[in-house]
Image (cartoon, grey):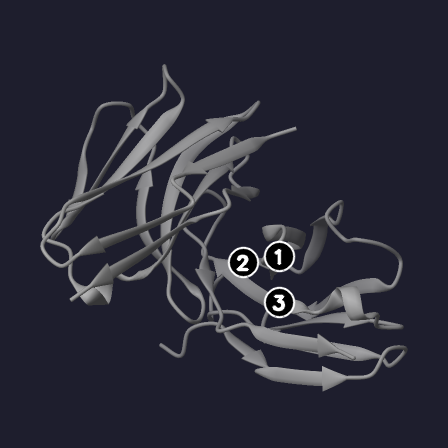
Amino acid sequence: EDKVVQSPLSLVVHEGDTVTLNCSYEVTNFRSLLWYKQEKKAPTFLFMLTSSGIEKKSGRLSSILDKKELFSILNITATQTGDSAVYLCAVLNNAGNMLTFGGGTRLMVKP
Amino acid sequence: DAGVIQSPRHEVTEMGQEVTLRCKPISGHNSLFWYRQTMMRGLELLIYFNNNVPIDDSGMPEDRFSAKMPNASFSTLKIQPSEPRDSAVYFCASTLQQGNEQFFGPGTRLTVL
């Protein structure tokens, strides 16, 4: 059975801190790994990672994939209160039609 | 672009009643997914359609759940009869083609009393 595990489960930091969220996976047919941010409503797409070692960056957020060790990290620098959310990691299968989600990391950024 | 549209946004019903959740995918997207999210189990895929055809419904909990996609712009998820343990947020998502990121609707929060 495909499995995606995220850590930590939750995290409380202060504005300006840097955080690293972890995602490890065990899947039989891996195609891509995706990161989503979920506030009070629907998950919104952040990154899709397909190749190992290539960092994707969007503003203060960046992510990288290690296909040998089967994990990904999501970094957020200079955190702001608006970064408070649940961050979800998901793995897309080879056929490109099945997303398996991790349990999420709940990040709270205090002023 | 209106994004994925779901209705209703909230539904409160009594055990035993039929519940129908609705989804309109983003225009032009040819794959549609129904997910359920609970605190205990996180986000789980229930069923997905490709070009209006159900491809994999192995995530559907039991026979009380059914889903249809009569055309490219509309899908329903029905629970009959509903039970308290069905209480969750149900998300619909669509994607332009398989392998691309999925765009999620706002969800329907279902409470079964």
Which label's residue is closer to the chain start, 2 or 3? 2
Residue B16 visible from this viewpoint: yes
Q: Are marks 2 and 1 in contact (CB under 8 Å)?
A: yes
Give the labeled residue for mark 2. Answer: B30
Residue A105, image x and y in percent?
40, 48
Q: Residues within 10 Å of mark 1 (few under 14, many from 20)?
A: some
Local SS, label 3: strand
Compute the Cα span from label 2 to label 3: 20 Å
Q: Are marks 1 and 3 in contact (CB under 8 Å)?
A: no
Which label's residue is closer to the chain start, 2 or 1? 2
Residue B21, image x and y in percent?
69, 76
Give the labeled residue for mark 1. Answer: B51
Task: Confirm whether circles 1 and 3 share one chain.
Answer: yes
Q: Chain of mark 2?
A: B
Q: Residues within 10 Å of mark 3 (few under 14, many from 20)?
A: many
Local SS, label 1: loop
Give the labeled residue for mark 3. Answer: B90
**For residue A108, which quarter of the picture?**
bottom left
Point 9% across, 52% down: residue: A78
Q: Does residue B89 appear to the left or right of A84 in the view shown?
A: right
**Disc 3 residue type (three-letter):** Tyr
Given residues A14 and B20, the one toward you in this image is A14
The quadrant of the image that shows the N terminus of chain B is bottom left
